[in-house]
Amino acid sequence: MSSAVPSPPRMRPLPLAGVLRVGRPSDIWFKPALSVVVATGVPNLTLLALGRLDLAMYTMAGSLCALYAHNLPYAARARALALVVLGMLATVAVALVTASLASSAAVLVTVGALLAAAHKALCDATGIGPPGPVVLTFIGSAALFAPQTAGQVPGHLALVAAAGAWAWLVGMAPGLVRPHGPERRATARALAAAADCAAAVGPDGRPDAGHERARAAAAAAVHAARQSLLAAGAPAGARRALAGLLVRAEVALAAPADADPALLRSWARDLRGRRPAPSPAAGPGSAELLGVDVAEALGKRRAAARFGPLVPIALRTALGCALAGYASLALGVGRPYWALVTAASLYQANLVLTWNRGVQRVVGNLAGVLLFAAVVPLAHLGPAALVLCCLALNFGAEALIGRNYWLGSVCVTPMALLVTEFAGFRPAGELMTERIADTLVGALVGLAAAVAVTNRRAGDRVEDALGTATRAREDAERLISAGSTGSGGLEPARRRLAGALVELRATADAAAGEWWQRALPGERVMRVERAGHRTLAATVRRQGPHVSEDARA
């Protein structure tokens, strides 16, 4: 812990540049897009055939679970999707029971805000990934305001469970064709990021201006790939080949001047295709990479460590969603849950990211309302047209949201408006007016809550992460000085150091985006990162010079 006197808190500017910039799509953008079409299409078309589209909200609750866990290996995906389905079922159960018992709209908004805070905390703590808590909050909030009697609840929950089981099957189906696809993609990303890091070192061995950022991105990609292989389960032949390639990425990250970026990118291209995984010469740690000892070496954070940093964000979510819903009620809007969901969708790891999401949400929703005005005449041709329009918008939302959140919102907004018409068509102008009002109310009130609830411990967590990384580096250097080369000592220490550096960078980035915060130790973070990566390079040299030679082959 630094002994320097903390500087007084200061306000940080909220940016506008680049907030709406369109990026590159995910390398698997089409998989969640196709999955959600199949997962929602079959139940909705079945209800259409039965003449019960009024029940579509409940089947969609289960079907939208197919959006989750597409980056996870199939062994881990099976568990994650099952938990998402159970979480969705629990959310809808709480919402429907509350709706059947409570008649006060203020009570419904309060329960919706508490559900939104719980969704945010649990999704962030478990790292479930996109689309995160927003889908759960959207469905839960809508269910709160659906007319309900206690006798209807079991049947509606049965529809959620059946559609959720179908979504689980849809999410697992690609594993029949390409069982190691997620691990291959994660390893390919690590190799490509390591190649970018190596390419940022000049011919004279000096790093370019963008080397620090490239190195941090590569460290995060390697760490994610390692976790992906660990989550894949017991080692198999294909996974052992991937483990060997991941070791090459680690070597390139630790000693970028000795790596061949072209070779690393070539391996990454092979993994993204259907070719057999390349098999470079085995290096240190490839056998242990998939073992239990490595999982123990990386360590599991305590529950307090996982949930502690999320307390301010959960408070922001609860306060912002509740106030947004109350403000919408005060304005007389018929669907206050839209304002609640808008507020819930804003909250990210820090205030700058929350501000960015707020701008994106408002722009995307306003453009989406215009798209709804263009689509609604087609959707009103009949129930079949309504279902097909929703499926097309579902696909568009998932295809575009990876490029920028606002682009996905352009399709999500008209889709959400059309879903309200499954029970019967309503005047388009009324729906559009309510959606615009709730978007503006939710965004303004949600951002105000984010400003009011400051994350004052962000700087303390940076200090904690600095201490953890420093201790991990000292442990590794002590083993190097003692002449350790075996997997029983140096290899777990190297893994702990790599994980600590990734955690340090993530913590520093999150703290840097807070609005009211004392000055952060940016120079100390950079020094500790550089020293840590030098130690990582030293561990590679200590474990065997042949590894660096293989990386240059």
Image (cartoon, helix red, strand yellow):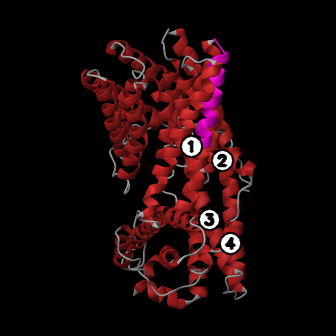
Q: Secondary structure at mark 1?
A: loop
Between circles 2 and 4, the one closer to the viewer is 4
- Which range is magenta? 85-103
Which numbered disc, 2 or 4, marks the residue that appears first in the sequence? 4
- Give how far across and how far down residue 411 sits, in percent: 34, 34
- Vertical side of 26 occupied by 321: above or below: above
Query: Which residue lies under the disc numbered 2?
Result: 459
Toward the front, the furthest residue is 50
Query: Which residue lies under the disc numbered 1?
Result: 349
Residue at point 59% right, 81% down?
A: 287
Based on the picture, tell me whether residue 100 belongs to the magenta stretch: yes
Based on the picture, tell me whether residue 361 belongs to the magenta stretch: no
The dot on residue 499 is 3
Amino acid type assigned to the residue bearing label 4 in the image: Val
- Give how far across and how far down residue 438 sits, in percent: 46, 19
Decide if residue 431 is on the left or right side of residue 337.
left
Q: Quadrant of the N terminus?
A: bottom right
